[in-house]
């Protein structure tokens, strides 16, 4: 989280410089990640004890971006994002089931991309459109899904008959403190539209990275950017 906040701060500081010198652009990025996580049950080996994570589809994306185009034939961009969705955690032992815990699956991501213009059209001093394609490197910090080992630790080893009254609060803190680091690569393609100083991107990105989306080693996302560009 600190890494993403620092990157967003850097982007906000650099906005005036990109505006003044005309070397690129920056702004806001939103999107929708495309994947499905199925319902899962952690085996316990103990009668009357069960842990089930509910399913969820995709994730919402919010972040910021910065790009420079001062290098001939290629542009460099960096974007930092937070993506997430919610799912229910259901736990039951000999004391009975607890109310479902609604928890957020979340990932903070940083993407570094090299992209090249494939095709472009322009109206001098007014508007322009470019089709881009590229790829690059990415890093992630992701909350894990709940599992039986976590619950066992939070109940001090008393899985079968431990007091679950405070399990919800403890589980949230545990998952936040045990985020998973991951790295990967990605490819992307999309359309950039410039009207005066308004800069808009619509692009699809496919990320190849393990330990980000549970049970998958790749996922897609459709993204929209709006910002300033010169």
Image (cartoon, grey):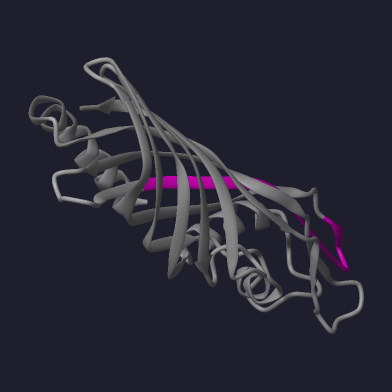
Residue closer to the observer: 12 or 123: 123
Q: Which residues are magenta?
A: 80-97
Residue in the picture at 68% in, 70% down: 147
Magenta segment includes 89:
yes
The answer to which of 202 and 93 lies nearer the viewer is 202
Q: Where is 27 relative to 159, above or below?
A: above
Find the residue positioned furthest to the right: 47
Q: Residue furthest left?
A: 21
**Which one is nearer the viewer's eye here, 107 or 65?**
65
* Spot occupied by residue 162 in the image (x, y as percentages of width and height): 74, 69
Task: Please tell me whether the stretch drawn in magenta is mainly helix, strand or loop.
Answer: strand
- Image quarter hosting the C terminus: top left
Residue sitting at x 39%, y 45%: 132
> Residue 23's image quarter?
top left
Q: Above or below — where is 12 with respect to 220?
A: above
| Placement of 206 over or under 117, stated as above or below | below
Which residue of the protein is positioned furthest toward the bottom in this rendering?
45
Inspect the magenta stretch and tell me whether residue 135 lies in it. no
Q: Is residue 79 left or right of residue 125?
A: right
Q: Position of residue 167 (x, y in %)?
A: 66, 58
Residue found 53% across the figure and 60% down from its top: 143
Residue at image position (73%, 51%) is: 56
Indicate left or right for 210 with 197 as reference: right
Q: Residue 182: horizontal and vertical position, in percent?
A: 44, 70
Q: Is residue 69 shown left or right of residue 41? A: left
Residue 185 placement (x, y as % from top left)? 43, 67
Q: How many marks?
A: 0
């Amino acid at each position: 989280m600190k890494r993403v906040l620092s990157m967003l701060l850097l982007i906000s500081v650099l906005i005036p410089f990109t505006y003044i010198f005309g070397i690129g652009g920056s702004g806001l990025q939103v999107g929708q990640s495309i994947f499905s996580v199925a319902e899962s049950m952690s085996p316990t080996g103990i009668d009357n004890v069960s842990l089930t994570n509910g399913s969820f589809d995709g994730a919402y994306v919010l972040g910021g971006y910065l790009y420079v185009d001062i290098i001939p034939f290629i542009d460099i961009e960096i974007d930092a994002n937070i993506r997430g969705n919610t799912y229910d955690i259901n736990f039951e032992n000999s004391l009975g089931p607890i109310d479902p815990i609604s928890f957020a699956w979340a990932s903070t991501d940083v993407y570094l991309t090299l992209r090249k213009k494939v095709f472009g059209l322009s109206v001098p001093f007014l508007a322009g459109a470019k089709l881009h394609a590229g790829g690059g490197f990415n890093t992630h910090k992701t909350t894990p899904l709940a599992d039986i080992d976590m619950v066992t630790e939070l109940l001090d080893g008393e899985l079968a008959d431990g007091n679950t009254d405070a399990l919800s609060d403890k589980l949230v803190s545990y998952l936040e403190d045990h985020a998973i680091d991951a790295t990967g690569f990605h490819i992307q393609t999309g359309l950039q539209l410039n009207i005066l100083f308004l800069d808009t991107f619509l692009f699809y990105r496919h990320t190849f990275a393990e330990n980000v989306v549970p049970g998958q080693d790749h996922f897609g996302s459709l993204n929209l950017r709006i910002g300033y560009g010169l």
